[in-house]
Each structure stands twice: as structure tokens, then as C-alpha cells.
Amino acid sequence: MFDFPLLISSLPKLLASLPVTLELFAAIVVAGICIGVPMALLGLSNSTVLNGFVKFYIGAFRGTPALVQLFFLYYGFGQFSFIRHSMLWPLLRDPFMCAVIALGMNSGAYTARILMGALSAVPKGIVEAAQALGLSNASILVKIKAPLAVRMSIPAYANETILNLKATSLASTVTIMELTGTSKLLVSETYAPYEIFVGAGLVYLAMTFVLAQLFKHLELIVGRKTGKPDSTSTPRKRSRVAALEAGDSADTQTASH
């Protein structure tokens, strides 16, 4: 029989682990943006070498599970003596930093793919009009392409961010006591997995709901500043962006699991 008093009594302990979860989540998102934005720009450059490198990076991190990447970084690198005696070892022996690096690089690959698709979806006519006015490539990117790309990429990036929040649960496999790690500890103490994990699921559900609402408001704010999507987008372009969002969301869910 389901023990509701145990569920209620476990919630304070689960909520006490939220600072670690949110700190890890914020670090992953920042790392993903710092990696994804430059990768997206390099991927759209005219250099064959840079394009190849970005394609390899995105393909490697999207094609393998995030858990495997985390295990490879945390357990694998320590097998090499030159790494244990290098300046990187203080970072790589820290489970929190390993989780941030591994999951941040994974998020960076998806972020880069989303941004590359959004930048490619900007109508060529707008870019050509800006070039006819004498704007430089940098000005066109900052003033025209970037705002439009950000607006188009918000739905797909919202999915990626929410999946990053849920991906923090993988950090429990490398001894980090975030929400899932704390849940496992409580289960070992109470032998009541249903009540504990239902409580953890409710906390995750509340956090994802808040994130979804924040992105919904962000999309409205960006839409007001850059114009409504339907007023400037062609049906063909909207179809391309919709397909991109659906594909990236499905790929992200596969890699996160």
C-alpha cells in the first residue's frame, strides 16, 4: 500500500538537495551555450576544415549516450598516468566538474545544431537586402540574423534546456548527491522506492513546469521585439524550423537516456 506519510516526510530531504541540482543545471546550461554558440558560427563558416570539425563534434556527442560520455570522462581518463600528473587532474577527479564538462559538452553539441539550423533558416532576401545597404557581415549577423535566429530557436532550445535539467540525474552515477542521488540514499534507508521516487518525480515535474513557463514568457518577449513569427516567416521557412525542432528534440531525448 502506498505510504503517503512517508512521501510527505521525504519531501523536505529531497528539497534540501535542490541547491546542488540547480547549481549543476546552471553550470551545464552555461557550458552548453559557451560551447554551442562558437561551434554554430564555425559550422556555418566557409572553411572546410572547421565545418568538418564541427560536424564530427556534433555527430560524436549526439550519436553516443550522455551517460557513456560521463563515465568515459570520470572513470576513463583516470586510467592514464600523464593525465593524473597533468594540470587537468584536479578538475577531472572532481565528480561535479566531470559532470559539468561531460553534460556541458553534450549540451553544446545540441545547442550548436539548433543554432545552425535557425541561422540557416533566416530568409536570404533579408540578408541580401542588408548587404545592398552596405552592412558588413558582422553587422548583419549581430543586428539581423542573430535576433531572428534566437526567436526561431527558442522552442527547440527550451526542450534542450528542460532535458538538461533532467539530465542532471545522471550525475548521481558519479556520487553527486543531487535530487536523484538523494532519492537513492533515502530508498536504501527506507526500502520504499515508490514513495521516494514519486516524490522526486513531483519535484522534477514542478521544476520543468517552471522552466516551460519561463521560456513561454521569453518567447513572447522576443516575439514582441522582433515581430510576430507569422508576419515575417514564409510557410516554407516555418516548416523547416518546425522539422528542426522536432528532430533535435527527439535526438536529445535519445542521447539523454
Image: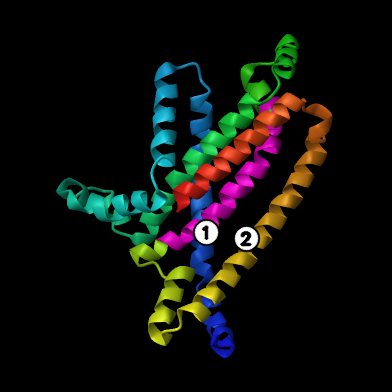
Residue denoted by label 2? 208
In this view, 108 is above or below 8: above
Indicate left or right for 255 with 174 as reference.
Answer: right
Q: Residue at x 62, y 28 (%)?
A: 119
Indicate whether residue 86 is drawn in magenta. Answer: no
Mark 2 Cα-neighbour bin, 10 Å: few <14, some 14–19, many ≥20: some
Q: Residue at x 59, y 70 (%)?
A: 203
Element under label 1?
helix
* Front residue of 45 and 14: 14
Q: Position of residue 151 (x, y in %)?
A: 71, 37
Coloration mode: rainbow
Element under label 2?
helix
* Front residue of 77 and 5: 5
* Front residue of 240 and 88: 240
Q: Position of residue 120 (x, y in %)?
A: 62, 25
Indicate left or right for 13 with 208 as reference.
Answer: left
Q: Position of residue 12 (x, y in %)?
A: 56, 82
**Span colored in magenta:** 143-170
Give the distance between the C-alpha atoms of the residues marked 2 and 1, in whole angstroms: 8 Å
Residue extending furthest toward the front: 1
Q: Main secondary structure of the magenta part?
A: helix
- The reply to whether the C-beta atoms of the residues labelled 2 and 1 are less than 8 Å apart is yes
Is residue 121 visible in this depiction of the protein?
yes
Q: Residue at x 61, y 34 (%)?
A: 244
Which amino acid is tagged 1?
Lys
Residue denoted by label 1? 166
Q: Position of residue 115 (x, y in %)?
A: 58, 34
